Image (cartoon, rainbow, N blue to C red):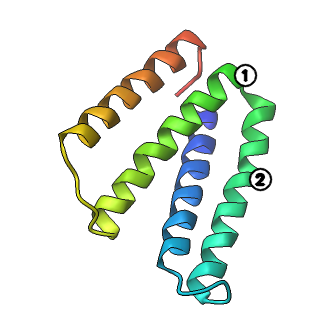
Amino acid sequence: MKVFAVFVMYTLLSAYGLYKIKLSADYFDADFIVGFACYFSGFVIWFYILKITPLTIAFPVAAGALIIVTTLFGVVLLNEAVNMYKIFGALFIMAGIVLMSLGGRLEI
C-alpha cells in the first residue's frame, strides 16, 4: 500500500504542476511558480520511486498513471474535448497498469 501512495503523490503533484503551468501567463506568474514547484516535487518523488520499485514496473505504471490523470485534469479543469479514442485509450492504459502491477508484484 505504501508504494501505491507514493505513486499517487507523484502522479497528482506532477499533473497538478502541469495544469498550473498550462494556466500561467509567463514564467514569473504565480501559477507558473506553483506549477513548477509541484512538478519538481513530483520529480523528486520519481527518484524515490526508482529506489523502491523495479524500473520495469516503475516507468510504465508512472507514465500510464500520469497520462490518465493529466487527461482527466485537461477534460475537467481545462474543458478540453473528450472522445471515444481518449476514453478507450485511458481504459487500455489502466488495463496495462493493472497487468504490469500484477506481473511485477507491485503492491497496490
Residue located farthest toward the top when viewing the structure as drawn:
103
Pick the residue in front: 15 or 88: 88
Binning the other alpha carbons within 10 Å of mark 2 as few (below 14), some (14 to 19) or many (20 upward) gives few
Q: Residue 98 placed where, x, y %?
A: 44, 22
Q: Horizontal placement of 85 versus 102: left or right?
A: left
Q: Residue 28 placed where, x, y %?
A: 67, 89
Binning the other alpha carbons within 10 Å of mark 1 as few (below 14), some (14 to 19) or many (20 upward) gives few
Specify the amino acid type for callout 1.
Pro
Badge 2 is on which residue? Answer: 44
Q: Quadrant of the N terminus?
A: top right
Pick the residue in front: 1 or 91: 91
Q: In this view, does 77 lie above or below 44?
A: below
Q: In this view, does 70 lie above or below 88?
A: below
Q: Horizontal placement of 52 versus 57: left or right?
A: right
Q: Residue 93 placed where, x, y %?
A: 40, 30
Residue at figure coordinates x 45%, y 16% from the top left: 99
Residue at figure coordinates x 41%, y 44% from the top left: 68
Residue at figure coordinates x 73%, y 22% from the top left: 54
Q: Quadrant of residue 88?
A: top left
Callout 1 secondary element: loop
Return the disc, 2 or 1, that comes first in the chain's sequence: 2
Residue at figure coordinates x 57%, y 23% from the top left: 107
Q: Horizontal placement of 34 versus 44: left or right?
A: left
Q: Residue 102 placed where, x, y %?
A: 50, 14
